[in-house]
Amino acid sequence: MKALSNVPFFPSLITLGNAFCGFLAIIKITDAAFLVGSRPLTAALQPEVFARIETAGLLIFLAMIFDALDGKVARLTDQTTDFGAQLDSLADVITFGVAPAVLAKFMVDLHQPPHGDLLPSHPKFYYLCAALFALFAVMRLARFNVETPSHSEEAHREFSGLPTPAAAAAIVSLLLFICAQTDNREITNLLFSPTIYNSLIRFLPLVLFLTGLLMISTLPYPHFMNTVFRGRKSFPFLALAVFVLILGALEWRIVLLSLCALYLLTGPVIGIFRLFFGGKDSGGDGELDEEVEEEDPGGQGTSQVLRRIEPGPRA
């Protein structure tokens, strides 16, 4: 068995920062659970409990920054290794698989007896939804490691199935949006009528399950960071980005949830479009034609040869 003697230091440290944020998020959830105990969620207790939920959610989003940086740093410093890839997946299991599932399960528990009455008491069903989200995240990451052996940037242009950080972002942004009911700002109150709030809580277990299904699907999802930040963009794109940033500074929960919902929809939309109108893989066998120059074995210089090139694996 080959011993591991050297590991990439700085990229691994960033990845461990991701895992540490996930661990802290789970600790915050347990702190909130101890606050509630077996008591009903009273109006006096609600802000303190929801504040811990918000902290846990923000820690998961902080972990996404670490997750976005570790691969970039590894490639920039030429420290891409299999150890780093496996460490990244293990950290993602904690932060983007287990932590969001526990957080959503806790929010569901707050609204079923004995704490609340918005949800019927079906603990086994709610446990199942949370467990499936976490397990689907594990399966998604394992499939990514198997299907994406390359450490190159090209292997991360498009994902097969919803990426685990995006799935976690969708769940956490919804929970942060629900927590906004404790604010007294007018725009938030307009969006948080009792009917809307009750509907969000009732559909939360289903959203958890459906988001998990999207992770193990083969729907094509673009790489958000590469799509937004790579290459030049049009002037209207820049103007739209400025508008979103200003709106986000005013109502960050609403903008965050809207962006996550839009990204969740991109997979089904792109998949349906390619199914009916064809796409980059519409050649039938998923291969691309490329004209290359090869050496003529007869010594007559180079010749133009048309060969079939298989695209790299998609996560």
Image: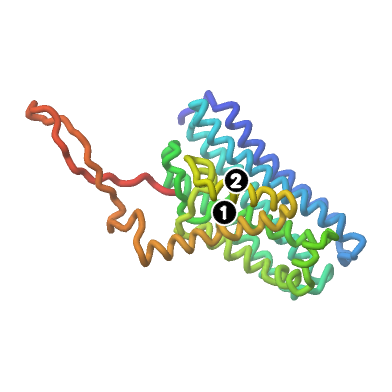
Q: Secondary structure at mark 2?
A: helix
Looking at the image, residue 206 lies above or below residue 221: below
The residue shown at (59%, 32%) is: 12
Q: Furthest residue to the front?
A: 235
Looking at the image, residue 302 lies above or below residue 188: above
Q: How many numbered discs, if any?
A: 2
The residue shown at (48%, 54%) is: 221
Q: Residues within 10 Å of mark 1 (few under 14, many from 20)?
A: many
| Residue 193 visible somewhere in the drawing | yes
Q: Position of residue 25 (x, y in %)?
A: 73, 47
Looking at the image, residue 173 lies above or below residue 305: below
Tell me if 146 is positioned left or right of 254 in this view: left
Q: Position of residue 110 (x, y in %)?
A: 79, 65
Q: Kindly identify which numbered label has been placed on residue 92.
A: 2
Q: Nearer the viewer, residue 305 or 34?
A: 305
Q: Kindly identify which numbered label has been placed on residue 90.
A: none
Q: Nearer the viewer, residue 112 or 45?
A: 45
Q: Nearer the viewer, residue 8 or 224?
A: 224
| Residue 143 visible somewhere in the drawing | no
Q: Residues within 10 Å of mark 2 (few under 14, many from 20)?
A: many
The residue shown at (63%, 63%) is: 208
1 or 2: tag closer to the N-terminus = 2
Q: Furthest residue to the right?
A: 44
Q: Position of residue 189 (x, y in %)?
A: 80, 65
Q: Mark 1 near mark 2, Cβ–Cβ under 8 Å?
A: yes
Q: Secondary structure at mark 1?
A: helix
The amino acid on which the numbered mark 1 sits, given as a three-letter code, is Ala
Q: Kindly identify which numbered label has been placed on residue 137.
A: 1
The amino acid on which the numbered mark 2 sits, given as a three-letter code, is Asp
Q: Position of residue 237 (x, y in %)?
A: 54, 49
Tell me if 220 is positioned left or right of 65 in this view: left
Disc 1 from disc 2: Cα separation: 9 Å
